[in-house]
Image (cartoon, grey):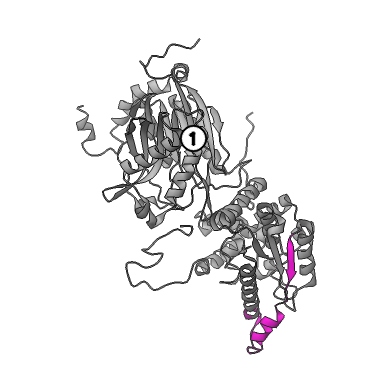
Amino acid sequence: MLPPDNHGARASRLRVALVQMKPLKGRYAENLRAAGDAFATLASDPPDVVVLPEGGLTGYFLEGAVYDLALEAPRFARDLARTWRDACGDAPVDIAAGFYENDGGTYFNSSIYLEVDRGGERIVHVHRKMFLPTYGVFDEQRFLSRGRKMSVFETRFGKMAMLICEDVWHTIVPAIAAIKGARVLIVPSAAPGRGIDGIGELTSITRWRDILRTVAGEHGVYVLYCGLTGFEGGKGMTGSSCAIDPRGDVIVEAPPAQACIVRADLDLREIDLARASLPLLGDLSAVLPDLLLDEELPLPRGARDVSGR
Amino acid sequence: MFPVVEAPAGAPGPPGIDAAVAAQWLVEFLRDELSARRSIGRAVIGLSGGIDSAVTAYLCARALGPENVYAFRLPYRTSSEASLLDAQLVVDALGINARTIEITGAVDGYLQHEPEADARRRGNVMARTRMLVLFDQSAKLEALPVGTGNKTERLLGYFTWHADDTPPVNPLGDLFKTQVWELARYLGVPEALIAKAPSADLEADQTDEADLGITYARADAILSKLLLGYSDAQLVDRGFSPDDVSLVRRRVDGTHWKRHLPTTAMLTNTAINEFYLRPVDF
């Protein structure tokens, strides 16, 4: 028998839909219509949370065109909410979606989390990608500014955090999100596939899955990974959107190379059970202060003084 | 006694490939680049009788359907009969459209004014003439020319600039030659094409490996490490011969320009592809 929900009145089930978009480069209005088509297929059984990938409505590799296509968060929220309502009427939903953000002339690779209901839409949080890959095929920091904070935010399903693509490759980032209370990590991503010397799939897909499973299993969190798909100038995005449970097992995973919707029905009480079995997050919370106070760590000047110790 | 488990010794071999994964990825690439992005459902391929164009034809047939693949055999008067027959094997196996257009008249029409042209110049004229035909046929057929160049020849500069490298999409350009052979076996390309010595067929009895001075297997093994940043000394440490390493390094370093668009003088802060940056698929 499962234990009772010990997180107040929050829902104990979370029905998610990960919309694996295959956008047309730079054609925002058409891609928004495509998202509307995806929403319409959910109308008969609307999920609680819908996730769209990084660059899901514009494409990922935009170079200088990012300044043409970046939107202010409220405008993006209105567009998403209108598209949802046009497809699904008054059904309430939370939407997490990647987008290029224009904040008064400073540009970010961001992900929005908003609540939509018959009364309108409310922006719950905007996460700005912290780790902007700028090597090899990537050139994000040439065009974008980086986010400065790994925030956790409250939803009707408990605390969540969003980590965009490379954010989740640095193990300390999901660790901090989990320590700050996130129980569900949403990961919008655009991952150009590479590596043909693996077995049965591109090696970059295997690497991604390994990372996501490790994060979920180490911290006892659900991970909702929503990947972009389609080729952009020869670089194929690997899709493979997936939901991973708090023990690190893949619940469901999309194929790499086609637009599709991944659905999963998550029992949020699994998180406590997983953490009881493998209390790594509690251990880390206890030891982290000692790790951070290590004088050999290259922390900013004065950081230890601010801690009051 | 403790048994000892030794790490593998000796020079590494050429890079591996999961041919099924690569084939599926390249089929998706061709569908996206031709049909989804450009709304073009047909491909034009210069079918030489060699392995690269054969593999490209097999991939295009999978991606677009054989009825939408147009293969052109474009022989010059010195081209080998065997090449034409090998190309025909591919046409027959796939059921793709095929046409033979002799380029001798076009090539000799120009070269009669340049009788002293050496083999290299004559070869370049043939390659550029073949591209002229393929682009014109693509306009006629409302099709897209699909390139066939592999990563090894691109890195070694073993191709004619603004000829073999001109088609707007290229499925094989990130695959070493040895990987193309593996892909060919997976796709079922006729064994005659896989087994024969690769040749540009610009001169009688010409072979790539004799031209290059190194086998593709050794070149690919070195290239796959060189691209990761290994120094010559590190490559020799790993068991490669100094002469091979030197040859490959010299060819790569001498041909960076062939892997770029023409150099344009920058005069403003809106210089195209320097300041004004838009992706190719925007």
Q: Which residue is mark 1?
A: A18
* Above-or-below relation of B92 to A217: below
Residue B280 falls left or right of residue B149: left
Which residue is depicted at the point 48% across and 57% down?
A: B281
Which residue is depicted at the point 75% across and 73% down?
A: B205
Q: Quadrant of residue B70?
A: bottom right
In the orientation shown, which residue stands out farthest toward the top? A1
Screen quadrant of the C terminus of chain B: bottom left
Q: Which residue type carries mark 1?
A: Leu
Which residue is depicted at the point 40% across and 61% down?
A: B277
Which residues make up the magenta segment?
B96-121
Residue B278 falls left or right of residue B100: left
Magenta stretch containing residue B129, yes or no?
Answer: no
Q: In front here: B191 or A234? A: A234
The answer to whether residue B126 is seen in the rendering is: yes
Q: Position of residue B237 (x, y in %)?
A: 56, 54
* Above-or-below relation of A267 to A94: above
Q: Position of residue A146 (x, y in %)?
A: 32, 45
Q: Position of residue A50 (x, y in %)?
A: 45, 33
